[in-house]
Image (spheres, rainbow, N blue to C red):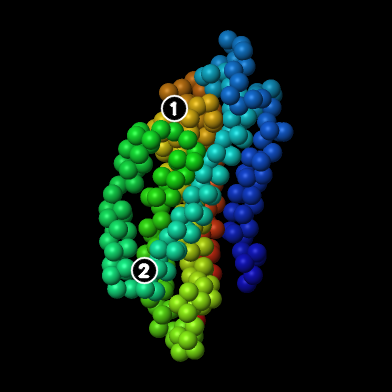
């Protein structure tokens, strides 16, 4: 079965790609400025209608426009964090697994220590001390998100180190760098891709949680988590303010999970 024939991967890719495309086109398709107060007293908490398709928030801002622009923050943060964490975790895992000895023990103790710290508590403390910005948010999420990939890659490298093609490369006198780059890295890209895809949903939830708690991107930049927080206290009179961004988060997290699960099952099926 071809990967593109997997309905789950196809559906997930279409959903995530569609949301990303809407975010890219937001400046041209958003009906209003996402941070602009519509300038009308009676425009606050308007229900979805023909002019405001998803209604307005308590600050008289168009929810649809904020949802489109918010996708740029939420998805870019999640994608950048997943890629950076996967790259850093892969480098640490290969170094620990291939070198071994003292280097391996030190790196794994650091990994275990960071894994023992509650992620949300660490993120909240760092955000409170260092301020708010999208770049800082991505950096904090990377710092707290690479450990799982490192442990996964280390385990794969330990297994690969005993395989015939690696032993043959060592016997031919190839440098350790060449062995890592040409013979080990290609074999760990599969599990790293699965881990990064599954981690995309977790990062999106973490970003939304921080934004909901007020530690995400600074005002007036919209994000889905911030939009959920903005409508949390008006659920009875303005359910649409929180509902639509919450549905967007749930849909993207579900799509990332389905894609990751499908890739993992395919990898197991292709394994010898």
Task: Quickly name the residue at label 2.
Answer: 96
Q: What residue is at 54 percent from the left and 58 percent from the top?
A: 259
Q: What residue is at 62 percent from the left and 60 percent from the top?
A: 7
Q: Secondary structure at mark 1?
A: helix
Contact (CB < 8 A) between labels 2 and 1? no
Instruction: For the N terminus, give its image quadrant.
Output: bottom right
Q: Is residue 128 left or right of residue 137?
A: left
Residue 222 against residue 270 in the figure, above or below: above
Task: Quickly name the residue at label 1.
Answer: 232
Classify residue 136 by image quadrant: top left
Q: Earlier in the sequence, mark 2 or mark 1?
A: 2
Neighbour class for label 2 at 10 Å: few (<14), some, many (≥20)?
A: many
Residue 98 against residue 247 in the figure, above or below: below
Q: What residue is at 44 percent from the left and 64 percent from the top?
A: 91
Residue 40 pos. (x, y %): 61, 11
Classify residue 149 by image quadrant: bottom left
Please state which of residues 59 and 148 is positioned toward the viewer in this rendering.
Answer: 148
Q: Secondary structure at mark 2?
A: helix
Classify residue 96 by image quadrant: bottom left
Residue 150 against residue 17 in the figure, above or below: below
């Amino acid at each position: 079965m071809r990967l593109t024939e997997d309905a789950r991967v196809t559906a997930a890719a279409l959903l995530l790609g569609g949301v990303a495309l809407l975010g890219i086109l937001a400046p041209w398709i958003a009906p209003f400025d996402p941070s602009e107060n519509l300038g009308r007293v009676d425009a606050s908490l308007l229900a979805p209608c023909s002019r405001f398709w998803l209604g307005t928030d308590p600050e008289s801002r168009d929810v649809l426009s904020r949802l489109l622009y918010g996708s740029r923050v939420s998805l870019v943060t999640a994608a950048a964090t997943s890629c950076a964490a996967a790259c850093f975790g892969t480098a640490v895992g290969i170094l620990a697994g291939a070198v071994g000895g003292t280097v391996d023990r030190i790196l794994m103790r650091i990994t275990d220590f960071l894994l023992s710290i509650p992620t949300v508590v660490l993120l909240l403390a760092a955000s409170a001390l260092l301020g708010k910005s999208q770049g800082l948010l991505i950096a904090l999420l990377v710092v707290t998100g690479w450990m799982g990939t490192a442990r996964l890659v280390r385990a794969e490298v330990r297994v690969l180190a005993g395989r015939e093609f690696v032993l043959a490369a060592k016997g031919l006198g190839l440098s350790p760098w060449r062995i890592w780059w040409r013979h080990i890295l290609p074999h760990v890209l599969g599990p790293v891709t699965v881990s990064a895809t599954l981690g995309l949903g977790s990062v999106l939830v973490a970003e939304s949680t921080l934004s909901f708690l007020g530690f995400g991107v600074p005002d007036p930049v919209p994000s889905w988590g911030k939009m959920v927080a903005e409508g949390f206290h008006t659920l009875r009179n303005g359910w649409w303010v929180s509902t639509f961004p919450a549905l967007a988060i749930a849909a993207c997290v579900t799509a990332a999970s389905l894609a990751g699960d499908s890739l993992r099952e395919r990898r197991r099926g292709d394994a010898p």
